[in-house]
Image (tube, grey):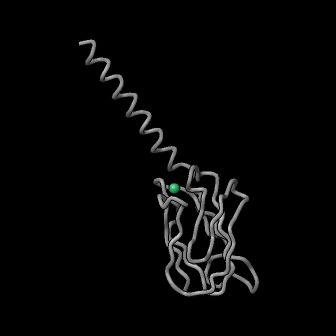
Amino acid sequence: MKNTTLLFGIALIVLIAGGFLYFSGNNNVTGKVINNEEGTLKNGQVNEIALSMKDYNYYPNTITVKEGETVRISLDSSIYGCLRDFTIKDFGVRKYLKTPDDYVEFVADKKGTYSFACSMGMGFGKLIVE
Ligand SMILES: [Cu+2]
């Protein structure tokens, strides 16, 4: 009887903790694409993208930019762990973005679909240059 109560108690704690992690993981989603609306980017302006975290991955995890644009990507404060080590191999990008003010910047000088990821490949997404 005692053991059953104990097990039930443990199960309850695991459920509550799991639920808390699940919801806290989704609360901070502020992923936003700045200056990325069709036609709003002026000549010489940088396309700024701030990624967020959702379901243990980058959010949004598909980014579309125009060929020739200078793209600046930062990671907001919801992103933690190795996902802050941001890479886009095809554009030679790899940087540990310690704070939301840190960013990577590159020129999207070739059309195509490329992947971005954390350095370990756990978080990943698509960068489409059109
Ligand atoms: Cu990783």
Please state the total of marks drawn on the protein image.
0
Residue 95 relative to residue 61: left or right = right
Outermost residue to the left: 1
On the image, the x and y values in percent for residue 16 come to: 42, 33
Is the N terminus in the top left, top right, bottom left or bottom right quadrant? top left
Looking at this view, is 36 or 89 the one in front?
A: 89
Residue at 63% across / 86% down in the picture?
A: 109
Residue at 50% across / 55% down in the picture?
A: 54
Outermost residue to the right: 44
Residue 5 relative to residue 84: left or right = left
Residue 113 relative to residue 50: left or right = left
Outermost residue to the top: 2
On the image, the x and y values in percent for residue 63 come to: 54, 73
Looking at this view, is 49 or 83 the one in front?
A: 83
| Above or below, 121 relative to 11 | below
| Above or below, 93 relative to 14 | below
